[in-house]
Image (cartoon, rainbow, N blue to C red):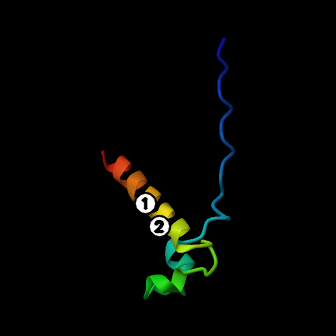
Amino acid sequence: MSTNPQPLPAQDGSDRVDLDELFRDARPVGDGSDLAAPGVFESTDELDEFLAWLRADRAAGLA
C-alpha cells in the first residue's frame, strides 16, 4: 500500500538571504595556512597516514 505524500508548506521567502548579502564581507583565502589548526594530528606519521587516505579516496572518486 502506498500513501500520497503531504504537500510541503508554502514558503514566503522571509527566511531567505540574498547570496550577494551573505558574502558581502567575505574575504578570499590568501594562504592555506590561514585554515590551519595546530594540534589536529599528533604526529607527522598520523598526518602522512591521513594524506595517503585522502589521496586514495579522491582517486577512487575519479574512477
In the rendered structure, the answer to whether residue 43 lies left or right of residue 10 reads: left
* Label 1 neighbour load within 10 Å: few <14, some 14-19, many 20+: few
Label 2 to label 1: alpha-carbon separation: 6 Å
* Label 2 neighbour load within 10 Å: few <14, some 14-19, many 20+: few
| Mark 1 residue type | Ala
In the rendered image of this protein, does residue 38 appear above or below residue 40? below
Judge by depth and name the residue closer to the eye, 40 or 14: 40
Image coords of residue 18 (percent x, y): 54, 72
Rendered image: mark on residue 16 = none
Is residue 26 visible in the rendered image? The answer is no
Question: Element at badge 2?
Answer: helix
| Mark 2 residue type | Asp
Image coords of residue 16 (percent x, y): 62, 65
In the rendered structure, the answer to whether residue 18 lies left or right of residue 15 reads: left
In the rendered structure, the answer to whether residue 58 lies left or right of residue 3 reads: left
Residue corresponding to mark 2: 48
Extreme residue toward the top, this view: 1
Quarter the C terminus occupies: top left
Image coords of residue 55 (percent x, y): 39, 59
Q: Residue at x 36, y 47 (%)?
A: 60
Judge by depth and name the residue closer to the eye, 16 or 23: 23
In the rendered image of this protein, does residue 46 appear above or below residue 38? above
Q: Are marks 2 and 1 in contact (CB under 8 Å)?
A: yes
Extreme residue toward the left, this view: 63
Question: Element at badge 1?
Answer: helix
Q: Residue at x 59, y 70 (%)?
A: 17
Is residue 21 visible in the rendered image? The answer is yes
Quarter the N terminus occupies: top right
Residue corresponding to mark 1: 52
In the rendered image of this protein, does residue 46 appear above or below residue 4? below
